[in-house]
Amino acid sequence: MQFLLAFILAAPLIGAAAALLPAPPGLKGKSPEQAVLRHGVTVTGVILAAAIALTLGFDHDTPARFQATTDISWIQALNVRIHLGIDGISLPLLLMTALLFFLCALYSYYKLPEGPSPKAFVALLLVLEAGTLATFAVLDLLLFFLAFEMVLIPMYFLIARWGGAQRQAAAWKFILFTLLGSVVMLLGLLLIGLNSGTFDMVALASDNGRELTHTTQLLAVLAIGIGLAVKTPMWPLHSWLPDAHTAAPTVGSVLLAGVLLKMGTYGFVRILLPITPGGMQTFAPYLGAFAAIGIVYGSLACLALARKGNKGDLKRLIAYSSVGHMGFVLLGIATMTPTGVNGALFANIAHGLITGLLFFLVGALKDRYGTADLDTLAGATGAALYGRAPRLGAFLAFAAVASLGLPGLAGFWGEMLALFGAFDPAEGLSRPAFLTYMALGGLGTLLTAGYLLIVVRRVCMGDPKAKSAAPAALPDIQHYEFAAWTPLVALTVLAGLWPAILLGLTDPAVQKLLAGGNS
């Protein structure tokens, strides 16, 4: 187990270095480009297999205990250690990350986005995987920061070099927002570590903030929270996200929504809730307010983009929907209750699966039509996917109803538990305020259903009054698309019908985390 976790974190970096080397003569296949793309699929596939083995070897009877741990002194002067481990909170995120990277590598093997060298693309993808996996496995504050920052440069280049229109501006906006947030977050992490004498997240969580004054906790929550909120993204620090998603290549959008956004909310749960509980309790009502506003704001923005004549881009619409969905995650965290935090963690996984699938589907639509503009899809080219590409239309309709929170699918449980948590927040929090947030969240679910059903009607059914210039039939789902999308559909159904598969892992770990490691 210890070796497996270390291998999962090291393999992407080794694979990235190997991707830049010339391919051995016997492994080139039809071309060097094909060889390096096959290399990406192989490395991510091996990492996924190792993550599955780690999951099977995980002691599911004690998910609150950190397992597969490594603890080695690194920088003695600062008491910084290479401390690794997983529990019921981090394991699902680690497994989902490995899965999404493998599916993106598989998809890119057949549909590489236009841009420079495939070698650079595969190497950047693997470096990005190393940073995201490490974020969910490290147990030292400074290591967490290094892993958190490690993803910025590869994602910047994936957008700037392989993206679409306005990619340079979107990439700069992404890097500037996240870097500025990270500088503030580093100050908060140093404040905690220097005041408590350790950067070890397990020791700090067990101490439960007793060594930190209330003022120190407030400053730490404010500084770290800003950095995490930018990455989440929380309203009003979200403005980089729609541009980044719209400009990014398909696999970039899938990974940005499915993995990178989860790093911010994971930081709230792993760092702020157990280490600075007093500061979190002070700021929780404000976090809940921003979350509730984000839910409604994201839904209203999507409704505006979905309206006929507004030239709404479907990728941009899904990006704004992420602002709303991640609002439910933040609302669950703000309640500081086991119900709300479990809901937040469940919604994290559901959003990664469903929104990742949605971005895959929009990428396929853009490949076929040359645009993601809703008016064009519904009008001049006459999308009408049910008639022209029925399997593609069925996948899009499934992803839409899963995203709106249909009972029986994964999107339902996280949002419901977050609202239940807001109904009865932790002791000391204002119940009337959180009841208001719950009502706004309920309104957000109605608005979400509205814009997603509009999208399904317009794209899958088309505009009956429009004269279509498109052929009667379009290429339906290809074999590589089916292979990349089916696991996300299956897991969305599995998590929806059997929520205990996730909650059984997260709940004991959340109970222990909120109790300061004492139960």
Image (cartoon, helix red, strand yellow):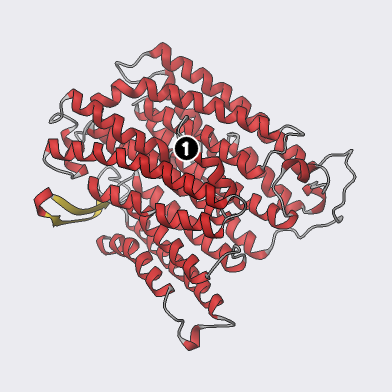
Instruction: Name above or below for residue 48 compared with residue 388.
Output: below
Tell me if 20 is positioned left or right of 407 in this view.
left
Q: Position of residue 131 (x, y in %)?
A: 36, 55
SS for dot 1: helix
The residue nearer to you, when weighing 438 against 251, is 251
Q: Is residue 507 at all visible to an observer of this figure?
A: no
Query: Hey, which quadrant is residue 463 in on the image?
Result: top right
In the rendered structure, the answer to whether residue 202 lies left or right of residue 498 reads: left
Q: Residue at x 65, y 49 (%)?
A: 362
Residue occupied by mark 1: 347
Rendering coords of residue 166 (x, y %): 59, 49
Task: State the residue in front, 509 or 218.
Answer: 218
- Residue 192's x, y, as percent? 19, 36
- Which residue is found at the position 40% from the left and 48% from the top? 92
Check the picture and name the quadrant holding the N terminus.
bottom left
Classed neighbour count for the residue bearing mark 1: other residues with Cα under 10 Å, few (<14), some (14–19), many (≥20): many
Residue drawn where x is 54% and y is 34% of the image = 412
Quadrant of res 212: top left
> Mark 1: which amino acid?
Ala
Residue 313, image quadrant? top right
